[in-house]
Image (spheres, rainbow, N blue to C red):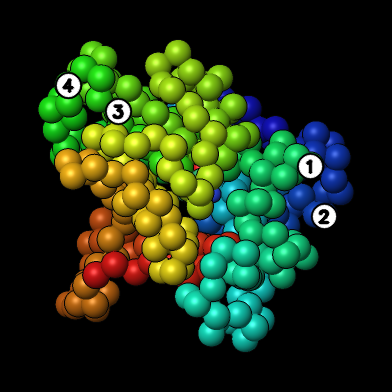
Amino acid sequence: MIPNDSTGIDISEISRKAGLPETTVILVLRQLALANIFRESSPRVFTHTPSSLLLAAPEFANTATLLLHHMDEGFKSAGHLPEALDLYAAKFDHVQKADLRTAFNLAFNTDLHYFDYIYAPENISQYGERFGRAMMGHDPAHLVDGVIDLYDWTQFKQGGKIVDVGGGVGHIGVKIAERVGSGVEVIVQDRPTVVEQGKLLHGNILTFLPHDFFLEQPVKDAQVYYLRHILHDWPDDVCRTILRHLYSAMNATSKLLIFELVFMDDKFWVEEGSGCSDEDTHWKREMVMMNLHMKNLLGLPRIVR
Ligand SMILES: C[S@@+](CC[C@H](N)C(=O)[O-])C[C@H]1O[C@@H](n2cnc3c(N)ncnc32)[C@H](O)[C@@H]1O
């Protein structure tokens, strides 16, 4: 509603475009301006800041989508954390998926697991499809190219198979496919609707296979089974179930690769002297926010030391 090159738009115009009363819109915009997203350049006139321009940039679209996922399912669930801790905390790591309940269940008034809810036919357009795009939004901050390059993907011969289990829409699979030699198949497995979403993006490069990782792994003897940001979604007992199915499909030379965020040592959290560097502060915020977000939606985050 505020064009990128605008020198300032009056609240009356923004309010007309939003279809909301000025008294409401100004409250939201002033709150945002305090967070340096938009600026009130003269009374009741708003312009962009570098932060709001970044959110509007096409190359930043997936990250903006990730923020929407956090603000919608995330914020709504966060308000229910205290009741969820009272009701469910003792059980978080002692149940399998069907019995797992979190703040999300209270906020959305459902007994479905978060993933079953967002991929239900009636919710796919509002939540499921957005989640698939949101997962690509992490890529710039998580330096995925650098991390993927830590592994030698050229070692596999023609006929080899690499399975990205729970690989989403294939945004990582496609990077792996760029690095392997010819004749090595990169297979991305996920829930059926995610696979369909992925096919539209990368169906010409990757093999997409609908698969529920709580069932027997259909691709046996692959060279690599890759789990990226999967185990952190599930309590330990549930992770064991996922891993057991992969273990049964592996042969003696198959590799299991796990790409996760690693929680830093306790010493990292103690501020010394004049405080920590900007990079450290950024990383701390990301870790704490991600962990609480996943606790709220999915239960107990995995904390790896
Ligand atoms: C946090 S996302 C990570 C996606 C991708 N690996 C990445 O790094 O962006 C977790 C993924 O697990 C998938 N998932 C959840 N439950 C699943 C199940 N039972 N079987 C297969 N995939 C599942 C979700 O659809 C989602 O794509």
Which residue is under mark 3? 161
Q: Work out which quarter of the rendered image holds the C terminus and state it.
A: bottom left
Under circle 4, the secondary element is loop
The disc labelled 4 sits on which kind of residue? Answer: Lys
Q: Work out which quarter of the rendered image holds the N terminus and state it.
A: top right
- Between circles 2 and 1, the one closer to the viewer is 1
The disc labelled 3 sits on which kind of residue? Answer: Lys
Which residue is under mark 1? 122
Using a 10 Å C-alpha cutoff, classify the residue at mark 4 as few (fewer than 14 neighbours), some (14 to 19) or many (20 or more): few
* Cα distance in 3D space between marks 4 and 2: 65 Å
Using a 10 Å C-alpha cutoff, classify the residue at mark 2 as few (fewer than 14 neighbours), some (14 to 19) or many (20 or more): few
The disc labelled 1 sits on which kind of residue? Answer: Glu
> Who's the residue at 44% across and 69% down the image?
237
Q: Earlier in the sequence, mark 3 or mark 1?
A: 1
- Between circles 4 and 2, the one closer to the viewer is 4
Report whether 50 appears left or right of 252: right
- Between circles 3 and 2, the one closer to the viewer is 3
Mark 3 near mark 1, Cβ–Cβ under 8 Å? no
Q: Earlier in the sequence, mark 2 or mark 1?
A: 2
Mark 3 near mark 2, Cβ–Cβ under 8 Å? no
Total number of numbered discs in the rendering? 4
Under circle 2, the secondary element is helix
Using a 10 Å C-alpha cutoff, classify the residue at mark 1 as few (fewer than 14 neighbours), some (14 to 19) or many (20 or more): few
* Mark 4 CB within 8 Å of ligand 1: no
* Mark 2 CB within 8 Å of ligand 1: no
Asked if one can make out residue 302 in the rendered structure from this viewpoint, the answer is yes
* Cα distance in 3D space between marks 2 and 1: 34 Å
* Cα distance in 3D space between marks 3 and 1: 35 Å
Using a 10 Å C-alpha cutoff, classify the residue at mark 3 as few (fewer than 14 neighbours), some (14 to 19) or many (20 or more): many
Which residue is under mark 4? 157
